[in-house]
Image: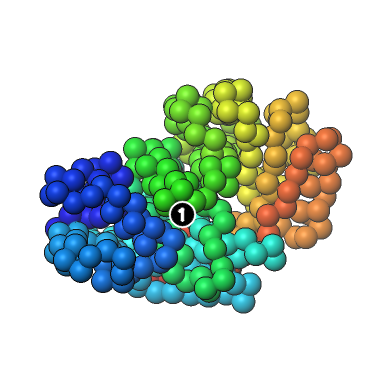
Amino acid sequence: MLRLLEQSPEGFRDWLTDRGLPGYRAAQVRKWLFQKRAAAFDEMTDLPLELRKQLAAEFAIWTTYIVERRRAGDGTEKLLLELHDAERIECVLLRDDKQHCTVCLSSQVGCAMGCAFCATGLDGVRRNLSSGEILEQMLHLQRLLAEDERLSHVVVMGMGEPLLNLDAVLPALAMAADRDGLGIGARRITISTVGIPAGIHRLAEENCQYHLAVSLHAATDALRNELVPANRGFGVAAVLEAADEYFALTKRRVTFEYVLLAGVNDQADHARQLIALLRGRPALVNVIPYNPVPGLPYRTPTPTATAKFVEILTQSGLNVNIRFRKGDRIRAACGQLRRLKRH
């Protein structure tokens, strides 16, 4: 059976026309899936009954199913999904007081980057996700929304390194942005990366207009090599060079994510090193107090230490935002729920 969400818009339209059916039916099906939240072909009532039967016989909409759903008091919801090959991934719905509804998506099963403080990388990477599996995460999360809620933002910030799977990530995000898809503007879509220079260069050349977030976590190679082992293959300077190119070609300001680890990268000297690295760049620094992972030695900084670190950065003229944790009571940090169910 064919997987509907793996079909490109052009490919699905060709499938219809090859059978003597009008090509515009493809847009109708997409509208039902992405805007009307249909779960099955028989819900698509403006399609002829025979076509609905034919589609149901030929195509599978869902190849994943929800193993577990958790909801936190702040409105954050997390899904553990099982894939067709019994692998499992996580995705998260984030709500805020501005009525924004953001989906946080995974791009791989596991992760090969091995960041020292992250649960996802503890078991390594299993495989890339397909574009359809990425889209299914969006649709599962969208179906958690109340009738008056709408998805407003997409972040590819879950399990995996998206720049190592751009052949699947980019088609999925194109459908999220498409008018016949979720209709989420490119400027409300964020791709988060540890900073794979070749991947950043590709994004810059394609000029997708997505927001780029680089998970920096340290301003020197010595410390970053410990926290982000992948950095040993290219170094901080190459990451910054690629980020500068991204801004030059897209005019999109780059965000640098900095997870604050107590006693590791949260001291005044670390703040000054970050200032020296980013001064003069049109960048935003997202400071993120660590979300603890059972079994790992890292701790969350005190509010006083966090405030001091941020104060040093802001006094230097850097644009800084503190991103507070959401959903920590439901193990919403990347990889936590998947590991809990496996071990």
Q: Nearer the viewer, residue 45 or 122?
A: 45
Give coordinates of residue 31: x percent, y percent. Answer: 39, 58
Up/down of 252 relative to 189, above or below: above
Give coordinates of residue 28: x percent, y percent. Answer: 34, 56
> Residue at (49%, 34%) from the top-left corner?
208
Residue 73 appears left or right of 170: right
Residue 83 appears left or right of 185: left
Label 1's element? loop
Give coordinates of residue 244: x percent, y percent. Answer: 61, 25
Q: If the image is split into quadrants, where does the N terminus sit?
A: bottom left
Q: How many labels does the image show?
A: 1
Residue 267 visible to the viewer: no
> Residue at (69%, 48%) from the top-left corner?
287
> Residue at (26%, 67%) from the top-left corner?
41
Residue 276 location, quadrant: top right
Residue 35 location, quadrant: bottom left
Tell me the crowding category of disc 1: few under 14, some 14 to 19, or many 20 or more residues within 10 angstroms, Cα based: many
Residue 111 appears left or right of 23: right
Q: How is the image coloured?
A: rainbow
Residue 74 visible to the viewer: yes
Q: If the image is split into quadrants, where does the C terminus sit?
A: bottom left
Up/down of 212 relative to 295, above or below: above
Give coordinates of residue 315: x percent, y percent. Answer: 86, 39
Q: Nearer the viewer, residue 157 or 100?
A: 100
Residue lying furthest right? 315
> Residue at (68%, 55%) from the top-left corner?
323
The amino acid marked with disc number 1 is Leu
State the residue position of label 1. Answer: 182
